[in-house]
Image (tube, grey):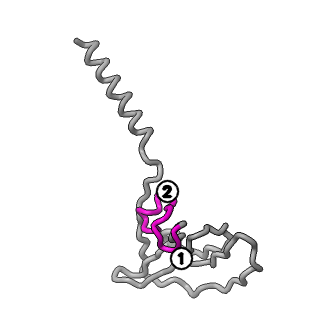
């Protein structure tokens, strides 16, 4: 009797481990960042000369949990069929809310129903 319970428990543990190993590793959570103070004015950054197959992402004010911090602009490889939405701060009912931006669309065109990178549909980026 005790061996049967032990073997059942081991089998249940093994099956649980297998199902967890197959779980979606791209699960994501949406977070709204709110601040009572508006972000400082956008810093002027000279846009560097164009690079083939890359787009320039303008710098923006982020939030480190205590204060606004400047995130400098950077080059990022183009994604055919996608459009990049710049991060932005919106004044809402709970103060200033940060919208992280990101890539929108897919091979079906901007906002299309084509491929969506893993975890991005739940974030509202597709």
The N terminus lies in quadrant? top left
Q: Which mark is residue 109?
A: none
Q: Which residue is mark 1?
A: 85
Structural distance between the alpha carbons of marks 1 and 2: 18 Å
Q: Which residue is mark 2?
A: 118
Q: Position of residue 77 (x, y in %)?
A: 67, 67
Q: Looking at the image, which residue sits at the far front?
A: 108
- Asked whether residue 63 is in view, the answer is no
All told, the count of numbered labels is 2
The magenta stretch is 108-126
Q: Position of residue 71 (x, y in %)?
A: 61, 73
- Asked whether residue 46 is in view, the answer is yes
Q: Looking at the image, which residue sits at the far left?
A: 1
| Horizontal arrangement in the rendering, residue 104 relative to residue 16 (left or right) | right
Is 7 above or below relative to 43?
A: above
| Magenta residue check for 13 | no
Foreground residue, 37 or 100?
100
Is 82 above or below relative to 94?
A: above
Foreground residue, 104 or 70?
104
Q: Secondary structure at mark 2?
A: loop
Q: Earlier in the sequence, mark 1 or mark 2?
A: 1
State whether the magenta stretch is mostly helix, strand or loop.
loop
Identified at 30% across, 18% down, the residue is 6
């Amino acid at each position: 009797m005790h061996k049967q319970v032990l073997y059942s428990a081991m089998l249940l543990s093994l099956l649980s481990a297998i199902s967890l190993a197959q779980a979606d590793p791209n699960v994501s959570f949406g977070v709204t960042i709110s601040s009572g103070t508006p972000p400082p004015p956008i810093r002027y950054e000279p846009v560097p000369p164009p690079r083939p197959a890359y787009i320039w992402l303008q710098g923006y004010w982020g939030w480190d949990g205590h204060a606004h911090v400047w995130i400098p602009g950077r080059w990022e490889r183009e994604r055919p069929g996608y459009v990049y939405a710049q991060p932005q701060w919106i004044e809402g009912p709970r103060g200033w809310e940060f919208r992280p931006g990101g890539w929108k669309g897919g091979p079906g065109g901007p906002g299309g129903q084509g491929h969506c990178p893993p975890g991005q549909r739940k974030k509202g980026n597709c």
